[in-house]
Amino acid sequence: MNLTTKMIVVLTVLTMVAGGLLSYWDGITSPRIEAYRLEQLKQAIAEVLPDHESYDEVKADGMILYIGKNSNDPEPVGLAFEAIGNGFQGKISIMVGISLDFKKINAIKILEQLETPGLGTKIVEDPSNKEDRFWFPNQFKNLITEPQIDVVKNIKPGKPNEIQAITGATISSVAMATILNDGIQKAKSIYQLKVQ
C-alpha cells in the first residue's frame, strides 16, 4: 500500500468515527434542546397572556394561536402568538399577548434574536438604563395597535400606538414594530376565520 492510499484510508476511518460520534451526541442532546425550547415557549405564553388557567391551540397558515381560558368563564381571556421576522442581524422571534379584538398588546417576550450585542440586544434588556433595564419591551405593555405600531426617534412617544426607538439601534426598533404589525394582521385573519 502506498502512502497516498494509507492516508486516504486513515482519513476515511477518522471521518466515519467523527461522524458517528457527532450523530450519537446529536441523538443525546436533541431531545433535551427540544424540551428546553418547549419549556421556554410555555413560560413565554404564561408571561404574555392575562391570568388564565389553560389555553387552546389553533394552528393555521404556519402560525399557532394560544387562546387563554379560565374554567369558570366560557369566553377566552386573550390570546398569544409567535411573530417572526427579520431584524438587523437575523431572525427575531417574539411571543405576543394581545386582546381578543387585536387592538391592544398585553405584553411581549423576545424568544430569539441575533441583534448587535450592546445595541440591538437592547430590544431584550438595556444594561445601560439603571432605572428600567427592560424599558424597551415594557413599552409594548398595553400598547394600542391601531392603525399600526409606529416608531419615534429621539422623542418620547406622544400617541398610544407609538414606541421610542433605541438610540443606535433604530433598525432593530423598526424591525420589532414591523414584525408585530405583520404578525398581528396574520393572527387576526386566522382568528376571524378559524375561531369566531
Image (cartoon, grey):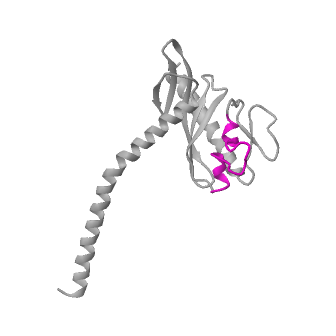
Q: Is residue 6 left or right of residue 98?
A: left
Tell me the chief SS of the magenta region: loop
Give percent across and percent down for residue 122: 66, 49
Number of marks drawn: 0
> Does residue 160 appear in the picture of this structure?
yes
> Splitting the image into 4 quarters, where does residue 118 fall?
bottom right
Residue at (64, 46) in percent of width and height? 125
Magenta run includes residue 119: yes
Q: Is residue 187 above or below residue 36?
A: above
Q: Is residue 3 left or right of residue 104?
A: left
> Splitting the image into 4 quarters, where does residue 84 fall?
top right
Residue at (53, 22) in percent of width and height? 52
Tell which of 156 and 188 is nearer to you: 156
Give percent across and percent down for residue 123: 65, 46
Residue at (72, 31) in percent of width and height? 147
The residue at the far left in this view is 1
Q: Is residue 17 left or right of residue 84?
A: left
Give percent across and percent down for residue 1: 17, 86
Magenta run includes residue 70: no
Q: Is residue 107 above or below residue 166?
A: above
> Does residue 177 appear in the picture of this structure?
no
Q: Is residue 194 above or below residue 158?
A: above
Residue at (81, 47) in percent of width and height? 154
Q: Is residue 118 above or below residue 17?
A: above
The residue at the far front in this view is 130
Tell which of 44 and 6 is nearer to you: 44
Q: Which residues are magenta?
A: 117-140
